[in-house]
């Protein structure tokens, strides 16, 4: 069994309700976030030969949490086995084994695990595994006012939403095999231009 | 955004990776006279006891690294990840080295230690040291961390150990008043420092174009060449201080066997670099008490036959005063080199950058 997230980058407006609900539900401190929303954009307006403005500007939002990867770097490097995949394929921290070394946080290309210094161990999105066990969706999925998030068993996820998981600012999916399906934004029709011109526009919001 | 906060957050690991590999390399070097049988009797006893010096330096690094753990109470679980997690492998190698070295040190206080057992222990310790330094070098070689999984990163750390290790070993040899081939032990870090500086220059070129979606290396480590320059200045200052210390103290012998002892200390046939077993056993009991078997007396000519039969007293050719001066001088040299290594270890943590979003 393996669960995964779907993010619809055409529907997401970057309202951050998902991040807010997550922070509230898990009672996180301001320096820890399990889900974050990246504003990604670039390009410019210029004047064409006919004197009319020509736009190459683009922007989209991407809500990112742990993608409960098939080949998770955090699990690979964890010295104690505290970082593990549970029976639903969700990557979770066993606080009774974790030494708080932070190796998981250093190695994750999605910035998912954090070290909770006050608690003395790593902390991360566990896919709201207790809610899922009760037949509920993760709180971020339930909170999204645009229904841009979903959470399903991986095969159902792929069937319904495809298997696209390569979209800036995310790392190449080949690195960790994320269980993530993205509905690409219109700008992604020219991915090369997105990669060349785009950047994270809200870096100071990122924890 | 710079990598200073990242490196400062991992300052204890900076300290660990500065001290532990150099301390381990120093231990290996200090054990060679006993391992190869060139130091015996009282010399070996003194050398063995002073292995606590590099051991303490390596332990200081390990203890420093443990302080960054959020929950050390779960530390025993680390052993379950050996071979799977690079960090576990590193810790297992460290524990093997420290445990064996601790046992060896305690055994050095035995009234009649068995030489074969000591040499066997030293052999095992040396294997654990090589494994430990390699494990530290590859501890952060994770494919998602693009700045740390470069081929030259582990090379730089091994060279760090070859720069710091011999200089620390010189302190230990001086404290034991063992006439190690100081020219060799200064030349080794000098050559290693040149190679290390070259590696850092090339590594800087490899790192420069690297970036992810949130930062670039040039943002994380502004003025990389300045950091490398500081490394070069400090490390070569250490080498120069060690060289001057060696030159000054090599001539400070007691008794009439000065010339022999000076020649021995400065050169070829002595200690680690010795090539002839007969030479290794040769004696010139300068500044020490002669044992029953030791026949060479200060101020007398020693025949080749007598020299071959005599026990190894020749190595102890420092006077106590010269020994103290050498300890101070070599300590200063080692500290300078370690300061240079510390800077580049700090820079290493500043460069942390993953694919995608990790900074």
Image: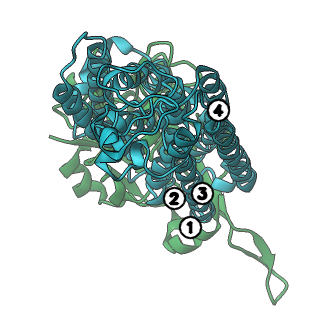
| Numbered disc in front, either 4 or 2 | 4
- Residue underneath mark 2: A168
Q: Report crowding for label 2: few under 14, some 14 to 19, many 20 or more residues within 10 A (C-alpha).
A: many
- Residue underneath mark 3: B200
Q: Do tags 3 and 1 sit on the same chain? A: no
Quadrant hosting residue A149 = top left
Image location of residue B1, percent across then percent down: 70, 43
User: Is residue B28 positioned above or below B233 on the image?
Assistant: above
Q: Secondary structure at mark 2?
A: loop
In front here: A82 or B66?
B66
Q: Report crowding for label 3: few under 14, some 14 to 19, many 20 or more residues within 10 A (C-alpha).
A: many
Chain B: give its colour: cyan
User: Is residue B179 positioned above or below B80 on the image?
Assistant: below
Q: Residue furthest bottom?
A: A49
Q: Are marks 2 and 1 in contact (CB under 8 Å)?
A: yes
Indicate the quadrant containing the N terminus of chain A: top left, top right, bottom left or bottom right: top left
Chain A: give its colour: green
Q: Chain of mark 1?
A: A
Which mark, residue B346?
none
Residue B105 shows in this picture? yes
Q: Do tags 3 and 2 sit on the same chain? A: no
Q: Report how far apart the C-alphas of labels 3 and 2 lie in the structure.
A: 31 Å
Q: Report how far apart the C-alphas of labels 3 and 1 lie in the structure.
A: 30 Å
- Residue underneath mark 4: B252
Image location of residue A173, percent across then percent down: 36, 58
Q: Are marks 3 and 4 in contact (CB under 8 Å)?
A: no
User: Is residue A61 positioned above or below A76 on the image?
Assistant: below
Q: Are marks 4 and 1 in contact (CB under 8 Å)?
A: no
| Numbered disc in front, either 3 or 4 | 4
């Amino acid at each position: 069994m393996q669960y995964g997230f779907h993010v619809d980058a055409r529907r997401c407006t970057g309202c951050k309700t998902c991040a807010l609900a997550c922070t509230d539900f898990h009672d996180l401190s301001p320096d820890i976030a399990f889900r974050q929303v990246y504003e990604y954009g670039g390009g410019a307006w210029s004047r064409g030969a006919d004197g009319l403005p020509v736009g190459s500007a683009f922007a989209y939002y991407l809500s990112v949490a742990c993608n409960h990867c098939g080949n998770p770097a955090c699990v690979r490097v964890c010295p104690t086995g505290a970082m593990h995949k549970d029976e639903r394929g969700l990557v979770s921290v066993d606080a009774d084994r974790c030494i708080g070394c932070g190796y998981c946080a250093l190695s994750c290309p999605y910035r998912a695990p954090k070290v909770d210094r006050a608690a003395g161990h790593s902390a991360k999105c566990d896919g709201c595994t207790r809610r899922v066990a009760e037949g509920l969706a993760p709180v971020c999925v339930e909170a999204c006012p645009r229904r841009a998030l979903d959470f399903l068993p991986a095969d159902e996820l792929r069937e319904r939403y495809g298997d696209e998981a390569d979209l800036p600012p995310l790392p190449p999916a080949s690195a960790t095999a994320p269980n993530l399906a993205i509905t690409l934004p219109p700008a992604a029709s020219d991915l090369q231009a997105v990669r060349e011109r785009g950047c994270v526009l809200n870096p100071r919001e990122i924890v | 955004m710079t990598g200073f906060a990242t490196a400062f957050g991992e300052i204890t690991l900076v300290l660990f990776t500065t001290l532990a590999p150099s301390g381990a390399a120093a231990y290996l070097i200090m054990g060679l006279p006993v391992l190869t049988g060139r130091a015996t009797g009282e010399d070996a006893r003194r050398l063995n006891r002073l292995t606590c010096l590099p051991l303490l330096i390596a332990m200081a690094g390990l203890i420093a690294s443990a302080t960054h753990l959020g929950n050390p109470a779960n530390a025993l679980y680390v052993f379950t990840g050996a071979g799977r997690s690079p960090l576990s492998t590193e810790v297992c190698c460290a524990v093997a080295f420290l445990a064996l070295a601790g046992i060896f040190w305690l055994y050095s206080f035995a009234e009649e230690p068995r030489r074969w057992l000591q040499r066997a222990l030293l052999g095992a310790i040396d294997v654990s040291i090589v494994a430990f330094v390699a494990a530290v070098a590859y501890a952060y070689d994770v494919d998602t961390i693009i700045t740390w999984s470069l081929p030259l990163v582990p090379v730089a750390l091994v060279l760090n150990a070859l720069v710091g290790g011999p200089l620390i070993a010189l302190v230990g040899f001086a404290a034991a008043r063992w006439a190690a081939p100081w020219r060799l032990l200064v030349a080794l870090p000098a050559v290693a420092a040149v190679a290390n500086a070259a590696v850092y220059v090339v590594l800087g070129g490899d790192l420069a174009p690297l970036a992810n979606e949130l930062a670039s290396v040039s943002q994380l480590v502004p003025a990389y060449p300045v950091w490398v320059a500081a490394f070069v200045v400090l490390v070569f200052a250490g080498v120069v201080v060690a060289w001057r210390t060696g030159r000054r103290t090599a001539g400070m012998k007691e008794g009439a066997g000065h010339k022999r002892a000076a020649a021995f200390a400065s050169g070829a046939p002595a200690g680690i670099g010795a090539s002839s077993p007969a030479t290794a056993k040769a004696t010139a009991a300068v500044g020490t008490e002669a044992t029953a078997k030791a026949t060479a007396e200060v101020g007398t000519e020693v025949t080749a036959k007598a020299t071959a039969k005599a026990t190894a007293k020749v190595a102890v050719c420092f006077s106590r005063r010269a020994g103290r001066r050498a300890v101070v001088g070599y300590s200063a040299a080692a500290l300078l080199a370690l300061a240079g290594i510390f800077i580049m270890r700090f820079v290493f943590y500043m460069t942390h950058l993953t694919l995608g979003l990790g900074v």
